[in-house]
Amino acid sequence: MASGLARQLAARAWCTPTTSGIDMDARLAEAFAEILDGVWSKAWLGNATTGELIEELKARSHLDYRTNKYWSNPTVDDE
């Protein structure tokens, strides 16, 4: 079952100047909406919350700092 937002966006396909004369098919609109929900649920599209993004950036900046420190001067002892 598709989300309400996905249904609304799928229904908009029948509201453009070039498609407004086509009768809406509710089954087709639901199928489009389910496809949209499937795409939106992919992590690679950035569905993370702001907090999750901030935590990821914190983790990456810490790792980059340590990695860059090590590779820029490999003779420095670990602290």
Image (cartoon, helix red, strand yellow):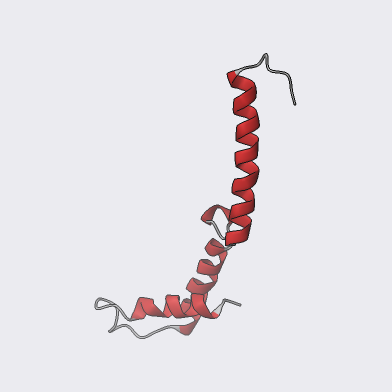
Q: How many marks?
A: 0
Q: Nearer the viewer, residue 69 or 21?
A: 69
Locate residue 3 relative to residue 79 in the image: left or right. left
Quadrant where the N terminus sits is bottom right
Tell me if residue 41 comes above or below residue 23 in the rendering. above
Tell me if residue 63 comes above or below residue 16 in the rendering. above
Locate residue 73 relative to residue 31 in the image: left or right. right
The residue depicted at 68 percent of the width and 17 percent of the height is 76
Measuring from the top left, give residue 2's x and y in whole percent: 57, 76
Locate residue 13 relative to residue 35 in the image: left or right. left
Q: Nearer the viewer, residue 22 or 40?
A: 40
> Which quarter of the figure has residue 37?
bottom right
The residue depicted at 64 percent of the width and 52 percent of the height is 55
Q: Is residue 39 visible?
A: yes
Q: Is residue 48 visible?
A: no
Q: Nearer the viewer, residue 63 or 2?
A: 63
Quadrant where the C terminus sits is top right
The residue depicted at 60 percent of the width and 53 percent of the height is 54
Q: Residue furthest top?
A: 75
Measuring from the top left, give residue 73's x and y in whole percent: 61, 17
Measuring from the top left, give residue 71's x and y in whole percent: 61, 21
Tell me if residue 29 comes above or below residue 68 in the rendering. below
Q: Nearer the viewer, residue 42 or 32?
A: 42
